[in-house]
Image (cartoon, rainbow, N blue to C red):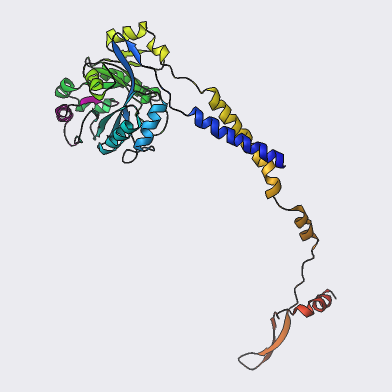
Amino acid sequence: MRVGRWISGVLLLAAFVAGTYADRAPRNAPIMMGGYRVLAGDFHIHSFPLSWSTLSPWGTVMEAQRQGLDVIAMTGHNDVWVAKVGRWFSRAAGGPTVLVGEEVVGPKYHMLALGIDHTVSWRQSAASAIAEIHAQGGVAIAAHPLARYWPAFDEEAMRGLDGAEVVHPIIYVRAKARREIPQFYARKPMTALGDSDYHGVGPMGLCRTYVFATDDSAGAVLQALREGHTVVYERDGRAYGDPELVSLAAQNGLFEKTGRAGPGRLVNVSGGCGIAGLLGWFVFGLGKGGVDKGKVLKCEGRKERPRRPAEKSKGFTTEGTEVETAGEVAEDPASQGSAAEAWRK
């Protein structure tokens, strides 16, 4: 039993060490194509609190590193202060480039405001919101533009709109969205984005944007988004974006180079050791902490102490009639044996 418990403990420790080592954030080698620095980005990410997400701002930055993202935009629902916390942490920790953003969420449209400093009110038309975003030096992107949002994007709004999400997780689960989102993107030439709309569930960067920028600074990324220098892939390899950059990416195998790798050996080792250790601890760990068999047998051999029968006493009713009443008398330890003997007879 003791040896089994020791082995189980060692396996659990090995699972912990291997899992911790395997969870290190990868360091991506810079990708250069045609004089551009190619950056993997996700520009639609939510953090706790206020945006129905589970990760803190610093947890969001760390997860972006784990997923190999070079740049992210933290886009709270109608707020920017959480994104500013995330940007500060990423700069201090040497993380990815973080754009301060907002998802302007209203009943008629959803819009990503990237590279802004203060919130953009949702209580205005889409065209007015776009103008306010541009006044702050930001970029306006239509978020998951389903057909129910199309009426808000009138002719004036479409003239100012910089881009739209064309690849979004919703297209893989809803056939209607699979048709509507690419149709909106086809309304005019604009910047293509692929975003995960991350809320703490599912992998960040599941849908991502490849930005062709001069460097990895926030200013260079925003300028590339304004100029439409992006390439976006669906999971089957279908590409959207600037035609020349799509061709350049195909020639250099960008889709194949940036494919998501499966779990490494250390992840499998960690999982196997953890399962084996838990099973071993369950099997061998109960030997010492279980019930003492000797005590069980001793308890089974003990006879139940008999109860003393109730004794009758006399009393009187309110009319003065004598009656007998039953009542239990407290047992005297010295008389327990005789009482039990009398009861058996």
Q: Please check the rendered image and state whether residue 108 is part of the magenta-colored stretch, yes or no.
A: no
Q: Residue at x 25, y 31 (%)?
A: 101
Which residue appears at 25% of the width and 24% of the height? Answer: 218
Front residue of this view, candidates 331 and 145:
331
Relative to 137, 245 lies left or right? right
In terms of depth relative to the viewer, which is nearer, 221 or 317?
A: 221
140 in magenta: yes
Residue 304 in sight in this render: yes
Tell me if residue 286 comes above or below residue 213 in the rendering. Answer: below
Residue 199, horizontal then vertical, whole percent? 37, 34
Residue 97 position within the rendered picture, expressed as x and y whole percent measured from the top left = 30, 26
Q: Quadrant of residue 115?
A: top left
For the record, the magenta segment spans: 121-144
Residue 190 falls in image quadrant: top left
The picture places residue 274, in percent across and down from the top left corner, at 59, 34
The correct choice, above or below, for 251 with respect to 336 in the image is: above
Which of 228/181 is in front?
228
Q: Is residue 300 above or below residue 93?
A: below
* Rendered-image quadrant of the N terminus: top right
Q: On the picture, is 3 further left or further right than 199?
A: right
Task: Quarter of the image for the C terminus: give it.
Answer: bottom right
Question: In screen coordinates, is 314 left or right of 265?
Answer: right
- Res 86 quadrant in image: top left
